[in-house]
Amino acid sequence: MCELFGFSGRRAADVTDYLKIFFSHSRMHPHGWGVMHSKGIVKEPVKAEDSETLKTLLNDLPPQKNMLAHIRYATVGSIKEENCHPFSGIDISGRRWTMIHNGTIYSGKNTYRYYKTQSGDTDSERLFLSFLDAMNDALCKGRLTERERFCAVSEFVETHAPRNKLNLMIFDGELLYVHKNLKNTLSYRYTDDGVMISTLPLDRGVWIPFPMAQVIAFKNGEEHYRGKRHSGVFIPNLEYITAYDAMNI
């Protein structure tokens, strides 16, 4: 199981103390780390606590308005940089999308076709490539408003949630989309600076369990859109059906 961190700010804020606590959890998730910040994406296939690159980044990081961070425990895919999150790409309108994922794609009929073209070998990257194509398909019908963009993301997640462990965060340059479908994962906390979402609470403040099985988008530190509740809640015992799924992709 990996861990996720996201921040949407009302203003640029210093969140390095929270990030240091978050990355200290890499003792249990030693197979890579990644950060999306205002200057781009940095990631390495090493334990975060052992990374000199990460130490330098956190020491020099200016206040941020939007952030994503990830620590990886490898379940699918080898330990290499191409398999570290975040994954990022540009749609046909020129918008950059960035995704972090905690989970496993067991029902891969919509994603396995990317196996030969992906850079790494994770199911999470295949999910992201499928997502980017879905956004491009939506854009082929015309330019999307912000709400239409949210609806396209929500529809994609709802389609892929059944039988898949789909805790994820996606950033499109303006909106931070968050979804979970596994109980007792992801909580969020509002502060004076904005909203933080994390797999585990990062301080003694009030962290609220994130709603199940619906996409919520944040902008400027506030909830902006909330999708409908769907039925694709992940049931852990489905983890044992992988052999059947692999034969029927």
Image (cartoon, rainbow, N blue to C red):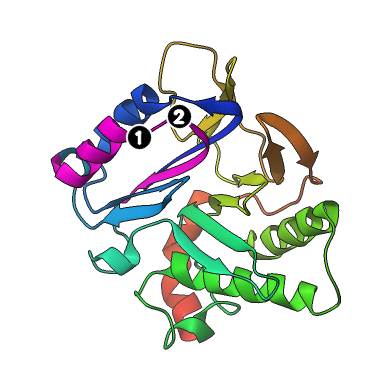
What crowding class fits label 2: few (fewer than 14 Cα within 10 Å), some (14-19), or many (20 or more)?
Answer: some
Which secondary structure lies at badge 1? loop
Q: In the rendered view, does 196 fall on the left or right side of 220?
A: left
Q: In this view, does 204 lie above or below 121?
A: above
Quadrant position of residue 75: bottom left
The magenta segment is 50-72
Q: What residue sits right under mark 1 in the picture?
A: 61
Q: Residue 63 carries which label?
A: 2
Q: Which residue occupies the foreground of this view, 125 or 249?
A: 125
Task: Indicate yes or no whether the magenta region holds residue 68.
Answer: yes
Which secondary structure lies at badge 2? loop
Q: Check if mark 1's residue and mark 2's residue have beta carbons within 8 Å.
A: no
Instruction: Give, as a three-letter code, the residue at label 2.
Output: Pro
Residue 172 % position (x, y)? 63, 54
Q: Residue at (67%, 76%) from the top-left corner?
A: 92
Q: Which residue occupies the foreground of this view, 85 or 3?
A: 85
Residue 202 % position (x, y)? 41, 22
Instruction: Give, as a three-letter code, the residue at label 1.
Output: Leu
Q: In the rendered view, does 3 fall on the left or right side of 207?
A: left
